[in-house]
């Protein structure tokens, strides 16, 4: 393990507390992992062994945590043998969890209008961030979410309002987009939905905005174009294939602009959250 992260990444034989299935092969698993729950931040992730017979771990973003009760939740879509095995786990089963890993989002109090733009399985860290912002002590953030998916959302949708009820209940406005004709969703890409909204806001409000985003690479590139168009700072949570996930193998490196020069950074421990302009420079 990378020495800089000793004492902050924990290995836990986590008990599966609950496993809920949703349409489109999606699952939310609740795992008892007290150390991880206590130290996780929005944007960090776990590296999870799906089954004792499958040694290669899978990186999964953290959806929610409860430090008091000692659990973390992950949302995943079944792709491949490993996640299929994880989906078969039930309450009382145990899985090996390595985490929390990575540098999460860094909310900026000087720019409290937080635009959360998420796509597909990139939505979980932004749901986590929305909860953090809504309960940030002494700082009044103004989060607004734009989420896109081609699969039914694994959260209750207010089809009439085109929003997620979980965020409605927290007082966080949200808008949904899809190219799959999902109820309550505007047709098209989520980045177009976000761009149209930002374009209606006065310059004084845009001066208080920061974009926080996670999703597939093409979506993140489109998000950065929106950030560049309106001169907004952005923090992007990258998705990348990983082997060790603790910085040792350098299998997840990406070029990042540092002091005007390209350097190779590891998504697992140097990220997964990076300054958007440093990754996708205009």
Image: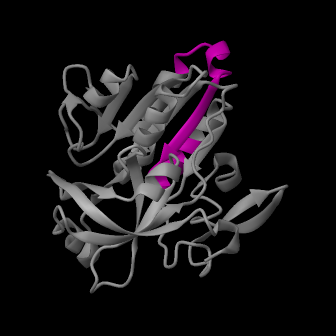
Choose between 181 and 54: the one closer to the eye: 54
Of residues 11 and 82, the one nearer the viewer is: 11
- Residue 121 placement, left or right of 211: left
Image coordinates for residue 224, horizontal then vertical, percent: 59, 44
Tell me what residue is drawn at x 61 percent, y 32 percent.
Answer: 210
In magenta stretch: residue 110:
no
| Relative vertical location of residue 158 with respect to residue 251 in this rendering, above or below | above
Q: In what quadrant of the picture does the N terminus appear?
A: bottom right
Q: Nearer the viewer, residue 222 or 265?
A: 265
| Residue at horizontal 26 percent and vertical 48 percent from the top | 150
Can you give x and y, in whole percent of width and height, for residue 183 in the image? 17, 32
Depicted 108 relative to depicted 276: above or below: above
Which quarter of the figure has residue 252? bottom right
Q: Which residues are magenta?
A: 199-224
Q: Horizontal placement of 9 versus 183: left or right?
A: right
Note whether 94 is above or below 162 in the view shown: below
């Amino acid at each position: 393990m990378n020495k800089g992260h000793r004492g902050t990444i924990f290995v836990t034989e986590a008990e599966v507390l609950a496993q809920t299935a949703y349409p489109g092969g999606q699952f939310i698993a609740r795992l008892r992992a007290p150390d991880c729950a206590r130290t996780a931040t929005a944007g960090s992730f776990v590296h999870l062994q799906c089954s004792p017979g499958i040694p290669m771990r899978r990186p999964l973003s953290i959806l929610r945590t409860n430090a008091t009760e000692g659990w973390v939740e992950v949302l995943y879509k079944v792709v491949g043998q490993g996640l299929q095995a994880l989906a078969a786990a039930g309450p009382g089963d145990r899985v090996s969890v390595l985490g929390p890993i990575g540098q999460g989002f860094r909310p900026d109090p000087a720019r409290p209008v937080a635009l959360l733009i998420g796509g597909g399985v990139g939505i979980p860290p932004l749901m986590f961030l929305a909860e953090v912002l809504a309960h940030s002590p002494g700082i009044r953030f103004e989060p607004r979410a734009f989420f896109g998916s081609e699969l039914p959302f694994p959260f209750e949708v207010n089809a009439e309002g085109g929003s997620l009820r979980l965020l409605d209940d927290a007082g966080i406005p949200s808008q949904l987009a899809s190219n799959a004709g999902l109820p309550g969703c505007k047709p098209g890409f989520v980045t177009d939905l976000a761009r149209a909204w930002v374009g209606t806001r006065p310059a004084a409000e845009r001066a208080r905005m920061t974009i926080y985003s996670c999703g597939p690479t093409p979506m993140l590139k489109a998000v950065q174009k929106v950030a560049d168009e309106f001169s907004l700072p952005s923090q992007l949570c990258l998705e990348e294939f990983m082997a060790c996930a603790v910085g040792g193998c350098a299998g997840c490196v990406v070029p990042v602009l540092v002091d005007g020069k390209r350097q190779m950074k590891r998504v697992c421990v140097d990220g997964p959250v990076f300054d958007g302009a440093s990754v996708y420079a205009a």
